[in-house]
Image: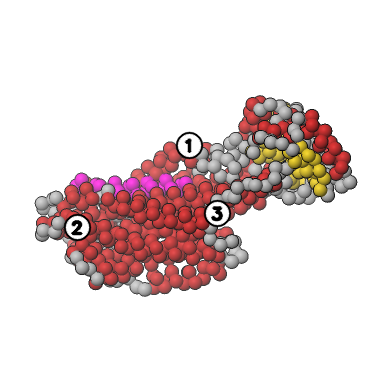
Amino acid sequence: MNLDLTWRLLKGGGRKGLLGVWLTLGAVAVSTALLLFAVAANLAFDARAERGAWRNPVPAAGDAVAVEASRFDYVRDQVITVVDLAALRPDAAPPPGLPRFPKPGETWLSPALAELARDLPPAELGDRYPRRAGVLGDEALVYPGELVAVVGHAPDAPAMTAERSDDWIVAKPPVRVASLAGTPSEDAEAYKVLAVIASVLMVVPLLVFGGAAARLTVARRDRRLAALRLVGATPGQVVRMTVAEAVLVALAGALAGAVAFALAVPYLTRIEIQGGAWFAGDLFPGLAVLAGVLVAVPLLVGLSAVAGLRRVVVSPLGVAKRETPPGMRFVRVLALLVVLAVFPMLTQGTSVAIVAVALGLAFLCLNLAGPWVVGLIGRITAGTARGPARLLAGRRLVDDPRSAWRTVSGVALTGFVAGFLGLLSPGAFAVDDRPLQLRVLAPAGQAEQVAGQARERLAAAKVPAVVTVVKRTVVAAPSGPLDTAGMDRARTALAELVPGRTATTEADEGRFGEQILLDVRVGTIVVLSVSFLVAIASAGITAASSVLDRRQTYGLLRLAGTPLEVLDRARRAETLIPLGVMGGGAILVGAFCATPFMIGGISVAGVVTLVVCVVLGFAGVIGAGALSRPLLRSVTADPAPRPD
């Protein structure tokens, strides 16, 4: 009975009533797709960490089955991860991606490295790995196209017994292990932490947008339900009809969003983080996660719809008469001020979970205080109005500050993200002017001997270089111009010069820090892109919904002689005025929350990022709002405006 009546009421709203349904469906679809992206990003970083864990050995507590060490090599300015393995028992399980444990002298290359070894001259790469036994499977790789080499050794080989640095940037010393399971590395854990913080910055606006989707065309629906209450419908019937309408539309939107996300995955895999792109399987959440999102989104929308029914159930006559609801209390702003006061203390020396919760609280309290501030802006605007458009805008803001806040909340919350991330965005990388010198640490007392071998090898490879010794470090500096191919020949010539060590440059040792900074910048762009998409979608959908909610009011004003241009200016003013105040305030709140994490002052790139965000945000909202002008012209052209 309730479902049948709900469907009849939806159809009875006419073409414009169904347009409101489509707006809600679109809002839910956008929220679901982006929510799946945020969840999938965290799962993808987890998958990467697990696949790379075998390279981060855990020392054996008892009997060991193998010895494992690793180091980094370089070719064509790309990093090669070299894992050295030696079996201590014949039944030692192979690492992921290998059919068997590598024998002494054997080398297994990743597909990308094997292809590179075939394409480049042997003197530039192939001679470093002469006995290639096969190709590694994807299970051994952190990302597609990763360059990895697994080299087998005897347990007493110099590469497995020689001294190595314990600095992970250069190499990891040999470790006796009980298995090759390992644990996620420190850098993998750091990326997981960054992913959690980025998810909070994306998910909270999405949840707010998803909740707001349930309140689209809320005035029209409330008046319709209030009329039903006045003719005898029980509170239970009203609640059930509301839930049925909201959940059915939200479920359709959630399914559409899931399909949109699935279609976008091939493009999302091209976003390069941590050195490479993504396996498509990493970005596809499991069936349990997908089912959870498809259940949670309609549930959130249903609960948000029911939460707004109090006036309909308690005072249907007031809703039907369009009485202005009681004003909101200052406690909303007080909650935000309390969170901001304790925020610096919450983020000092605490876990990432506490930081994520603190950011989430700041987000939610900003969203809570928004309608109260919009109402205050409306009173000031109406009191200082010098024309009809501004007066109409101010009165509208006072009459329904919640609806006005929904129109600008997306950009305001994006302002928070921009203020937080913009100031933390790392600056541009300095031009690398470090000397091009290959260096390798020689064993104690053998520096001169190693230097002599280096001279012979470089001369045989026809690489002009001056080899010197600085304490225990053998330094090979080119004596003439050296291109990329020449550098790779020099690296190949010096391979295994010192067992277990790789000749590196200063640029090699600094590239890992630069990679993290680059990834932070990429992550910032991704998060801001998602936030802008939410903001623009929110502004466009809620602006159209607002026109539908007030189509009778607009029609009557138009019949009374109000010019369409005045109505349009009033509509723009009620968006742009709170947007300027709330957007600027949200940026300041975001910047304040970023101060505990700032190191080394504000970067120029961060300020530029912030300015670009502000410009794009305002342009996006103005453009999205302009799309609803034809709808305004349409509803005001109705000669007999009527409520639904």
- The Cα–Cα distance between marks 1 and 2, rounded to whole angstroms, is 44 Å
Residue 567, numbered circle: 2
Which residue is depicted at the point 43% across and 42% down? 261
Residue 66 lies, in percent from the top left, at: 78, 40
Q: Could you tell me how far apart the alpha carbons at marks 2 and 3 are, in whole angstroms?
A: 45 Å
Secondary structure mainly formed by the magenta segment: helix
Of helix, strand and loop, which one carries label 2?
helix
- Label 1 crowd (10 A; few <14 / some 14-19 / many >=20): few
Q: Which contiguous range is marked in magenta?
A: 13-38
Question: Disc 3 on helix, strand or loop?
Answer: loop
The relative height of residue 381 versus residue 283 in the rendered view (above or below) is below
Q: Along the horizontal axis of the image, is 442 left or right of 305?
A: right
Judged left or right of residue 6, residue 96 is right
Percent x, y for residue 75?
A: 67, 36
Coordinates of residue 416 in the picture (x, y in percent): 44, 60
Picture residue at 87% right of the left edge, 47% below the top? 444
Is residue 35 a member of the stretch shown in magenta?
yes
Whether residue 8 is in magenta: the answer is no
| Model colouring | secondary structure
* Residue occupying the point 50% across, 59% down: 423
Q: Is residue 394 visible?
A: yes
Contact between marks 1 and 3 (CB within 8 A): the answer is: no
Q: Quadrant of residue 497?
A: top right
Number of numbered discs overlaid on the protein picture: 3
Quarter of the image that includes the C terminus: bottom left
Front position among marks 1 and 2: 2
Q: Tell me which residue sits at (87%, 42%) in the image.
A: 448
Find disc 3 in the rendering and name its residue: 426
Instruction: First in sequence, mark 2 or 3: give its number.
Output: 3
Residue 256 position, x and y percent, is 37, 42
Does the rendering let one see residue 500? no
Q: Which residue is mark 1?
A: 266
